[in-house]
């Protein structure tokens, strides 16, 4: 028959559960005592008293800071995903979706720079997600560039606004932190 024992590290913290044949000797870094585990924030085995004790005291300020940091990181990721996911522009008179990942942002910058310094460039073929490559005249392309720039800036302003609100002292509970959604 198998028994469950818990491997603990040298500081007394749980590492993993192990199943052993009951006939075998329990390894020195394992214990078979589960009593006292329930209700502990971070259980720790006390080698002197031979029982589970609280390994870390719950600190609401630390937990709130951790929740804020995690939420800001989540919102940053979602902001970046939104921007990199592309945008819609009506620069040709109808809506088209354009890629806006890092490569396309770089290419937008190169293209807008080229048409800014050379009046010889009158048409710019540019790929759309929904209609393949479409030809844009200078005015269309400048508008496309401005639409992409506005799209990126609006998402960044949204992110930085939410970040500032989360970091404000009036957001004083984990529930309030979690109420921020992208």
Image (tube, grey):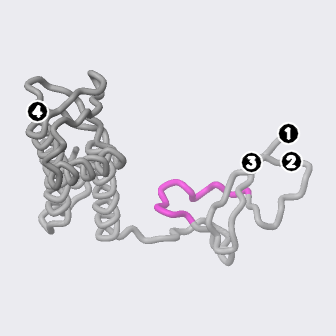
Whether tag 1 and tag 2 are in contact, CB under 8 A, the answer is yes
Q: Nearer the viewer, residue 12 or 128?
A: 128
Foreground disc of the pair 4, 1: 4
Per the image, label 3 sits on a secondary structure element best described as strand
Start and end of the magenta stretch? 32-43
Residues at marks 1 and 3, CA–CA distance in whole angstroms: 10 Å
Q: Nearer the viewer, residue 130 or 53?
A: 130
Q: Is residue 67 above or below residue 83?
A: below
Q: Nearer the viewer, residue 169 or 130?
A: 130
- What crowding class fits label 3: few (fewer than 14 Cα within 10 Å), some (14-19), or many (20 or more)? some
Foreground disc of the pair 4, 3: 4
Would residue 78 be visible to someone looking at this image?
no
Tag of residue 123: none
Q: Position of residue 39 (x, y in %)?
A: 47, 56
Residues at marks 4 and 2, CA–CA distance in whole angstroms: 74 Å
Q: Position of residue 129 (x, y in %)?
A: 30, 28
Residues at marks 1 and 2, CA–CA distance in whole angstroms: 6 Å
| Residue receiving disc 3 | 4
| Residue receiving disc 4 | 91
Per the image, label 2 sits on a secondary structure element best described as loop
């Amino acid at each position: 028959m198998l028994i469950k024992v818990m491997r603990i590290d040298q500081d007394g913290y749980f590492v993993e559960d192990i199943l052993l044949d009951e006939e075998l000797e329990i390894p020195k870094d394992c214990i078979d005592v589960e009593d006292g585990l329930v209700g502990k924030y971070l259980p720790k085995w006390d080698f002197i008293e031979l029982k589970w004790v609280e390994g870390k005291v719950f600190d609401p300020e630390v937990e709130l800071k951790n929740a804020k940091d995690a939420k800001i990181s989540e919102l940053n990721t979602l902001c970046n995903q939104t921007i990199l996911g592309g945008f819609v522009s009506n620069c040709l008179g109808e809506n088209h979706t354009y890629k806006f990942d890092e490569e396309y942002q770089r290419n937008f910058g190169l293209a807008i720079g080229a048409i800014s310094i050379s009046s010889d460039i009158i048409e710019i073929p540019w790929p759309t997600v929904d209609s393949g490559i479409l030809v844009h005249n200078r005015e269309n392309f400048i508008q496309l560039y401005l639409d992409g720039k506005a799209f990126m800036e609006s998402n960044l302003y949204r992110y930085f606004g939410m970040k500032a609100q989360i970091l404000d002292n009036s957001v004083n509970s984990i529930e309030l932190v979690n109420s921020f959604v992208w």
